[in-house]
């Protein structure tokens, strides 16, 4: 197992190197650079831009060097923890992402927890009560949750919350607390805001996961070894939870590996609608305006998380199912 | 109830409620299993032999399968329990299932849970029915592995099913089934999925363990070779009904029912270069059964009455019954 993890880590390094190269190229692929955007901006403000000024800007952002050099400077600094400057915000990428990351992780992990806690029990219930009224109701709600776009649900929640329950709209804090230092009251205020994005982002995932859990468990419940377990005289509860559920968890663990990057990039649209201080909208903006280092840093984080997520999923799978061996 | 009789099945009706109508998988079946004997159930796929077994285990496929009538009396040393009267999920039947009546299945490759070691799966059964410590259960499990002739049991006990061959897995299944020393072992095609050399080993093992553990065996198969090797008595089933019941010798050397005769004609005999004679036609759909005797449309000796009226059971001898109009000159019996 240790050898497997070591080897996987080496592969991961190689993958990351390739991702950084291709990512960098792709970000630079659209015509023009951030500089063109900047110049256009200056011109629209009525200012004139001299050749010297442009050259100055180029030097400042390192755009006068060749693409190879730019890449090398970026990646060698990246390894040291210096992610470069953001063009749009004119601050180090690190300072830009840092404070947003905490809330993003909070919302994303909250969503994941919500999704799993809701989806797994409902999935189990649905599978063990197939085609009964409860299963049909959950299936209906599930498809509804799956098909309603998140941003629409966010808007509906905001309207209902504001009109009927006098709930705060959007953001993570009320105005009174926005700039206040962390306190118990602020924490309460945070939780008051937090449930909306968690439920909004969680519904689609929950609905999908219910279907996966239900389908799998139904499949497993038809296996011969479930009949064997029943033939031993075990109670139905033990048969389902000890013998069936553990075998039905595989695809869920695989989704876990995939959903790690979603911690950063997920729910972007919802975050924009709900005005959440998370990283999603930032990434989106960076890509749109060719903010090279900001976008590149995001891309790197996403790839690293995806790879780590898959490694964790593989290790978990081996732990759940002894048939899976990594040699 | 005669104390020599372990299980007495009377007028058992196990039906399936399907979208196309009620399927009578087991239709008015009566038989006994005596203590320490081996009874074979033979018949084509879908004749109701497995469903008869699952009715006794009270493990019918849910929610469609249901016992509509009849009784299954289990004679637990003088204390007679009607299994059909118990809730299939409640405690009473669960204390019988796996403890007094155990079952092994056709597919050893999929009969064991892949995520638990074989030891855990044997011990689970032991600890469920007997109040023993984990350590004692483990010792008992190792002892069971020795009984089923698994080499290096101390090592094998911690292995997972996928590390074992099909024959080994069936041995493990037998070890689980016998770990609580049941009075009745139901074996549903236990060797169908195994190759012939392994089949012989497993059958030998079952016979040997039957002597050791003093139990009755109900063996379900469509292989007459297995019947000949294992059983004392044979019950032949066709479309949910028992058509003939006799000692194994009588079934092979003096078969009465045209269906049994047909089955015997369709097995090859070593050294004979005769062509095999199959039974004409195919098993009727259980949803649209013919009038009269269900076998009549395929029967070479069918008379007019066969197509009109269902034959009763005729007693050929004390221990030989046949459900066929050809024997209407002998005494008719109700069961």
Image: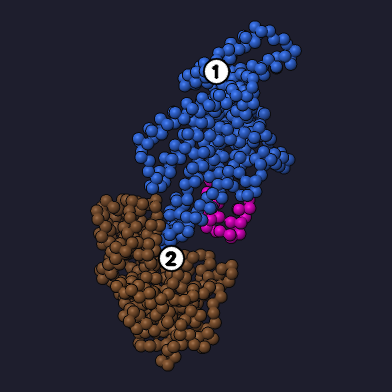
Chain colours: A blue, B brown
Residue beneath the point at 54% across and 52% down: A214
The magenta span reads A117-141
Could you say whether the residue bearing mark 1 is in a helix, strand or loop? helix
Front in this rendered view, residue A158 or A35: A35
Magenta segment's dominant SS is helix
Residue beneath label 2, please? B91
For marks 2 and 1, give the CA distance: 74 Å
Image position of B124 (left or right of B299): left
Res B21 quadrant in image: bottom right
Quarter of the rendering occupied by the N terminus of chain A:
top left
Any mark on residue A67, and which? 1
Res B138 quadrant in image: bottom left
The mark lying in front, picked from 2 and 1, is 1
Q: Position of residue B207 (x, y in %)?
A: 28, 69
Residue beneath the point at 46% across and 87% down: B325
Residue A305 magenta-highlighted: no
Q: Position of residue A117 (x, y in %)?
A: 53, 46
Quarter of the rendering occupied by the C terminus of chain A:
top left
What count of labels does the image hold?
Answer: 2
Any mark on residue A263, and which? none
Residue beneath the point at 68% across and 15% down: A39
Front in this rendered view, residue B314 or A85: B314
């Amino acid at each position: 197992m240790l050898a497997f993890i070591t080897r996987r880590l080496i592969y991961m390094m190689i993958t990351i190197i390739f991702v950084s190269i291709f990512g960098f190229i792709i970000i630079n692929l659209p015509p023009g650079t951030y500089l063109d955007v900047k110049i256009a901006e200056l011109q629209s403000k009525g200012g004139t831009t001299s050749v010297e000024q442009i050259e100055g800007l180029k030097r400042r952002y390192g755009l006068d060097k060749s693409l190879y050099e730019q890449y090398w400077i970026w990646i060698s600094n990246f390894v040291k923890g210096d992610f470069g400057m953001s063009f749009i915000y004119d601050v180090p990428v690190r300072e830009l992402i840092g404070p947003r990351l905490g809330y993003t992780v909070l919302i994303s992990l909250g969503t994941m927890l919500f999704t799993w806690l809701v989806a797994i029990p409902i999935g189990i219930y649905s599978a063990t009560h197939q085609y009964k009224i409860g299963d049909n109701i959950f299936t209906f709600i599930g498809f509804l949750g799956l098909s309603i776009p998140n941003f629409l649900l966010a808007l509906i929640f905001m309207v209902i919350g504001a009109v009927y329950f006098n709930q705060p709209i959007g953001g993570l804090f009320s105005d009174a607390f926005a700039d206040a230092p962390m306190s118990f009251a602020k924490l309460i205020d945070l939780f008051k805001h937090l449930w909306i994005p968690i439920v909004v982002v969680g519904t689609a995932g929950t609905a999908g996961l219910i279907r996966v859990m239900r389908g799998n468990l139904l499949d497993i419940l038809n296996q011969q070894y479930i009949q064997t377990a029943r033939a031993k005289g075990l109670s139905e509860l033990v048969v389902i939870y000890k013998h069936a559920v553990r075998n039905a968890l595989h695809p869920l663990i695989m989704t876990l590996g995939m959903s790690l990057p979603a911690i950063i990039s997920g729910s972007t649209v919802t975050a924009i609608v709900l005005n959440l201080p998370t990283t999603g909208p930032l990434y989106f903006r960076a890509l749109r305006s060719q903010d090279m280092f900001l976008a590149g840093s995001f891309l790197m984080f996403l790839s690293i998380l995806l790879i780590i997520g898959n490694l964790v999923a593989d290790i978990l799978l081996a732990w759940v199912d002894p048939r899976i061996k990594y040699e | 109830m005669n104390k020599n009789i372990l299980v007495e099945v009377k007028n058992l009706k196990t039906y399936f409620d399907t979208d196309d109508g009620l399927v009578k998988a087991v239709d008015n079946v009566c038989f006994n299993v005596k203590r320490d004997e081996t009874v074979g159930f033979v018949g084509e796929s879908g004749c109701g032999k497995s469903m008869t077994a699952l009715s006794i285990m009270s493990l019918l496929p849910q929610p469609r399968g249901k016992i509509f009538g009849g009784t299954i009396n289990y004679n637990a040393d003088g204390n007679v329990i009607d299994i059909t009267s118990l809730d299939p999920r409640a405690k009473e039947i669960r204390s019988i299932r796996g403890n007094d009546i155990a079952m092994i299945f056709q597919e050893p490759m999929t009969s064991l849970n892949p995520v638990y070691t074989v030891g855990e799966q044997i011990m689970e059964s032991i600890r469920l029915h007997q109040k023993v410590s984990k350590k004692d259960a483990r010792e008992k499990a190792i002892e069971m592995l020795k009984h089923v002739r698994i080499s290096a049991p101390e090592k094998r006990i911690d292995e997972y099913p996928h590390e074992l061959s099909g024959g080994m897995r069936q041995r493990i299944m037998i070890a689980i089934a016998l770990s609580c020393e049941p009075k009745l072992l139901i074996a549903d095609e236990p060797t169908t999925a195994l190759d012939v050399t392994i089949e012989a080993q497993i059958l030998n093992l079952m016979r040997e363990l039957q002597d050791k553990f003093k139990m009755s065996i109900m063996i379900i198969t469509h292989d007459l070779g297995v019947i000949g090797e294992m059983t004392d008595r044979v019950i032949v089933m066709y479309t949910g009904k028992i058509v003939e019941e006799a000692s194994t010798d009588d079934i092979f050397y003096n078969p009465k029912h045209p269906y049994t005769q047909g089955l015997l004609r369709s097995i090859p005999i070593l050294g004979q270069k005769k062509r095999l004679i199959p039974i004409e036609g195919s098993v009727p759909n259980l949803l649209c059964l013919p009038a009269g005797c269900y076998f009549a449309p395929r029967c070479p000796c069918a008379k007019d009455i066969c197509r009109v009226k269902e034959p009763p059971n005729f007693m050929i001898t004390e221990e030989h019954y046949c459900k066929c109009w050809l024997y209407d000159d002998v005494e008719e019996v109700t069961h």
